[in-house]
Each structure stands twice: as C-alpha cells, then as structure tokens.
Amino acid sequence: MRAPDLTADVATVLIPADQLQAKVAELGVTLSRDYAGRELTLVSVLKGALPFMADLMRAISIPVQIDLMEVSSYGGTATETSGLVRILKDLSSSIDGRDVVIVEDIIDTGLTLNYLLRYLRGKNPRTLRICALLDKPARRLVEIEIDYRGFTIPDQFVVGYGLDYGEFYRNLPFIGVLKPEVYGSE
C-alpha cells in the first residue's frame, strides 16, 4: 500500500465535523433521557468506534460506565467482511443485569454486529441496545434493529472519525468518501 495522503485520497466530505458533533450531542441527550435514573454501560467496538464513544460519553449527563471489545471480520486492508467473526478483546467487567448500549461506528452487512448481539445476550444484560453513528442499509445481509442512529449513508467506502482503510484515515475529523483508486487495487 502506498503512503496515504489524508487530503488528496478523500473524494468528498460526506459528513462535516460540525454535523458529526451536533449529532453526537443529540444522541447523548437522547440516551441521558432514555436512561434517566439508571446506570448505563457503553460497550465500544474497537478500533473504529473509539472517537465516537469518547465524544458520546462526554455528551451523556447521567452516570455511565464504559467497556471495550475488539472483534474482527476484516483482514488487513480488506474492504469486504470475511464473514468469520473473532473476538480479539472481550469485556473487562460483567454486564449481568446492566443496561448496555453497544456503540458502533458503522453497520454495514450486519454480520459482525449480529454475532456480537448474540454473544452479549449470553452475558445476561438487563437491556441491550445499539447506538450506531453510521448506517449503510444498502449492504445489509442480516436484519439489525438500530435503537439510536446517527446518519444513514449511501453504499460508499467511507473513512474518518475512527473509520479506516489499512489503519489510516481514522484521525480525520469528518466522514469522507475514499477515492476508489486508493483501495481499488486489492
């Protein structure tokens, strides 16, 4: 893979930084209202959801705990899911009897999240819901109920705000569409 050019490799900005921050603030208010009087546990799926999780937890005004998981269904720089899901890092604490919201960067085919939902339900949370920054329904292979949705996006390869290609572009403050020639040589 050639060295990335963070500016030139992005064809267009799909969601500007200010719109992202406004939506995250809105989601934080909604979660605070929906879980008022309860303690909330946010479970982030590494690595892509980390910036979203960090901003979201700061936008929540009720007691909140966080935990991190890492799952993989992609290889190195692959742009397509392999269908094989592996847990690389499990939860650090029990979620038994807790109100849990899975914080996801993007829901694409739904295969990885479907696996994760089944896995976490086996840990007996009181409630289990999904908060996804981006929803790409055109690629959905498994029906997923998204409780808290940031943006619905078209079927384009996006990077930024945690989303990567080959572990790069995560640090962009916006969601951008990556030029096909950047990833098209796979």
Image: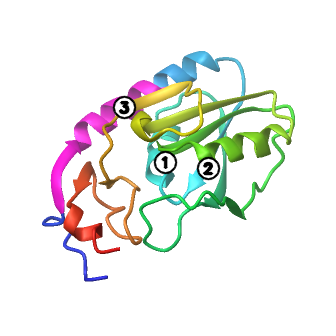
User: In front here: 186 or 115?
Assistant: 186
| Residue 114 locus on image (x, y percent) | 66, 41
Classed neighbour count for the residue bearing mark 1: other residues with Cα under 10 Å, few (<14), some (14–19), many (≥20): few
Q: Amino acid at mark 1?
A: Ala
From which residue to which does the magenta span run? 10-28
In the rendered view, tell whether residue 132 sits above or below residue 162.
above
Q: Main secondary structure of the magenta part?
A: helix
Classed neighbour count for the residue bearing mark 2: other residues with Cα under 10 Å, few (<14), some (14–19), many (≥20): many
Instruction: Give the alpha-carbon distance from disc 1 to disc 3, as whole Å.
Output: 21 Å
Label 2 secondary element: helix
| Residue 23 locus on image (x, y percent) | 36, 30
Q: Which mark is residue 183?
A: none
Q: Going by the image, does 39 lie left or right of 113?
A: right
Which mark sits nearer the N-terminus, 1 or 2? 1
Q: How is the image coloured?
A: rainbow
In the rendered view, tell whether residue 174 sits above or below residue 136.
below
Instruction: Give the alpha-carbon distance from disc 3 to disc 2, as whole Å.
Output: 18 Å
Q: Which mark is residue 112?
A: 2
- For the point 53% across and 70% down, the residue is 75
Which mark sits nearer the N-terminus, 3 or 2? 2
Q: Going by the image, does 90 lie left or right of 140?
A: right
- For the point 54% across and 33% down, the residue is 131
- Location of mark 1 (residue): 54
Q: Which mark is residue 152?
A: 3
Label 1 secondary element: helix
